[in-house]
Amino acid sequence: MRNLMEKAAELKNNADSEIREIQSSKDLTEVAKAKRIAEIRTTTNAKITAYQAEHYESKTAMRDDLHHRLFGLGFPFGASAADKQSAKLNYRDALFRADTITDENAALRMLGRAQMTGDKELAKAIASVSYEKGWDKVLNDFASQSEAIRSNLQELNDFEHNLGNAQIRITESMSFAQLPESPQEQRARMSGTLSQPTGAEVITRL
């Protein structure tokens, strides 16, 4: 799938071209121009809104997937329903225990015991809480278990950093900006000769 910001940009470029063509037409009245431009703008903006929603839903899903890979439950092939239910209950209890930890040193001690006893659910629960609280020492200890964990943690950190990147947020805002009302529309609307397309009409054109 192409980048949704690129698709939104292409959509706006095409709409701008159509609008310029209408504006330069010698065969259309000003009211006719305003109505056609309004239809293009309304339909284009609806599509941009849909792309924007899909873009942010995709980012949320990606973050959730990274978080699950690091801190979620995984079941071995062939695990029975009873084994899965037991692991879920253990993980729930582990999260309750991890939530009671008040400082990073205590989290390090509990993580050490969990690793020593092979309690994977508790280790993941402690790491999850530590990630939320920014306890880097605990996370580094947790990540030292394997290259896969280190890689996933780095990917999640990079992803979170990009989420807060001001330049990326500005780019997203510009990419999904709505097409503004044209001068023809403004004049027609103020004169009472332009009615906006209804929601049903926009959906039909989509």
Image: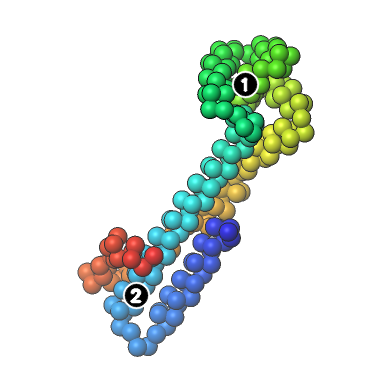
Question: In the figure, 180 relative to 34: above or below?
Answer: above
x, y percent for residue 120: 66, 21
Q: Amino acid at mark 1?
A: Glu
Q: Residue furthest bottom?
A: 27
Q: Is residue 111 visible?
A: no
At 55% from the left and 45% from the top, the residue drawn is 59
Circle 2: element type: helix
At 34% from the left and 62% from the top, the residue drawn is 203
Disc 2 marks which residue? 36
At 48% from the left and 56% from the top, the residue drawn is 51
Question: In the figure, 70 relative to 14: above or below?
Answer: above
Question: In the figure, 8 relative to 169: above or below?
Answer: below
Q: Residues within 10 Å of mark 1 (few under 14, many from 20)?
A: many
Tell me the CA gap for discs 1 and 2.
60 Å
Q: Is residue 47 visible?
A: yes
Task: Tell me whether circle 1 and circle 2 mark residues in contact (CB < 8 Å).
Answer: no
Q: Residues within 10 Å of mark 2 (few under 14, many from 20)?
A: some
User: Residue 121, which numbered label?
Assistant: 1
